Image (cartoon, rainbow, N blue to C red):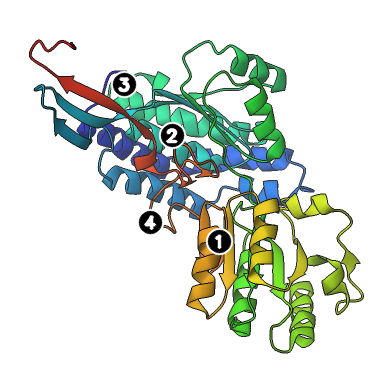
Amino acid sequence: MKLIATDIKNKVLDSMVRILNENRTELLEANKRDLELFNKNDQALYERLIVDDKKIEEMIGAVQKVRSQEDPVGRDISEEELPNGLKVINKTAPFGTIMIIYESRPDVTIEAAVLAFKANNKILLKGGKEALHSNTVLVDFWHRALKENELSTDYIQLLNLNREETRAFLKKPNQKLDLIVPRGGERLIAFVKEHASCAVLVSGRGNNFLYVDEQADWEMSLQVILNAKTAKISACNALDKILIHTNIEDYSQKMTDLARILKENGVSLLVDEGAQKVLKEEALIPEASVWKEEFLALKCCIGTVEKTEEAIETINNHSGGHSATIMTQNKETALRFMEQVDCAAVYQNASTRFTDGGQMGVGAELAISTDKLHHRGPLGLKQLVTNKYYVFGEGQIRE
């Protein structure tokens, strides 16, 4: 793929900032059409679909942030001169063509495209049908920015495909695909993995856990739990499962307080047998599979453990590999938990809601990867490149 000069890429992003700012009304009207057509029964998807002036400012900010970041392409990773005289340089290089499949969120159309483009990739945007009008306008904005700078609109493409057409495209794409990122739930991920003919990087599933250790600060724990559970239920970094150490001081009273506070904030509860001994009016978790569910709703499970190792095992068996928190004042316990829990982000005394590119200092993100190859966690600008070896010689042959 031809490399675009950094200053040209930045000029495209400058154009996009101006176009977004000057054409707010056009975008808001398109989003209004999407919202009018949407079934509001799915609260999480509806929240993700909304575009307002604040969201547009965030989109503009995401473009500006990426514009200010160093171009990740062509950077030296390592350099070595071998005894035979060969000079070997390992450099960053674009992936090529990335496809992202996502639901509802028009802001992904901005963040995914700006990151892919600045990293010199082409991107195919397969947004959900519920955001069709919003995404069509946003991609048109991108095309205006590209044309202003005499670049092909092929760099950023919107795919309007139904399920059958998507399946056919994944199996036999009409252009070269190098990476697919399904940003959504388990059914979407399974669908893409089943049919894709190139590398798939998994993103999107949450089902995040928080463990309250016996040495936790209880008031702090309540604040963190409320934030992680109720601040934004549509986010993949929202909290779904809470584990409480049975040896915590005033265990029964604290369990009662936790349930009351969650319910006062509209959260429905399911509890395990240990928790039900105290929370007698709450429904039992009906089956083990519920521990693996991502709720995307004002709903959570409360379970009990008798030791930290039990909490670690439960999380590793059931979480989505996204985020997990331990609430404790014991640094050794925290470190043991953080080393052994198999998630992309592990926290001590902080909300899982911070698993976000902007919050973690990465900037805009394509997604939160829960895979281990090639990267885990927020996929920012630096993570949207691969590598290539440049080997310089003077006629060397291998004997």
Amino acid carrying label 3: it is: Leu
Q: CA distance from mark 1 to mark 3?
A: 38 Å
- Up-down relation of residue 71 to residue 378 (above or below): above
Label 1 – label 4 distance at C-alpha: 14 Å
Residue 353 numbered mark, or none: 1
> Residue 113 shows which numbered tag?
2
Residue 147's mark?
none
Q: Who's the residue at 88% across and 77% down the image?
A: 277
Q: Earlier in the sequence, mark 1 or mark 2?
A: 2
- Crowd tier of the residue under label 3, counting other residues whose Cα lies within 10 Å: few below 14, some 14–19, many 20 or above: some
Q: Amino acid at mark 1?
A: Arg
- Which residue: 56% across, 67% down? 351
Question: Is label 1 in contact with label 3 (beta carbons under 8 Å)?
Answer: no
Distance CA(mark 4)–CA(mark 3): 30 Å
Question: Of the residues tagged 1 and 2, which is closer to the observer?
Answer: 1
Mark 1 or mark 4, earlier in chain: 1
Q: Give the tally of numbered discs.
A: 4
Task: Judge the density around disc 1: few (<14), some (14-19), many (≥20) Cα neighbours within 10 Å.
Answer: many
Residue 392, given in percent of the width and then of the height, sits at 13, 20
Q: Residue furthest bottom?
A: 250
Label 3 and label 2: CA atoms lie apart by: 15 Å
Mark closest to the chain's N terminus, 3 or 2: 2
* Residue neighbourhood size for the residue with mark 2, other residues' Cα within 10 Å, grouped as few (<14), some (14–19), many (≥20): many
Residue 14 vs 227, above or below: the answer is above
Q: Which residue type does callout 2 highlight?
A: Ala
Q: Which mark is residue 151?
A: 3
Q: Earlier in the sequence, mark 1 or mark 3?
A: 3
Of label 4 and label 3, which has the lower sequence position? 3
Name the side, left or right, on which 383 lies relative to 262.
Answer: left
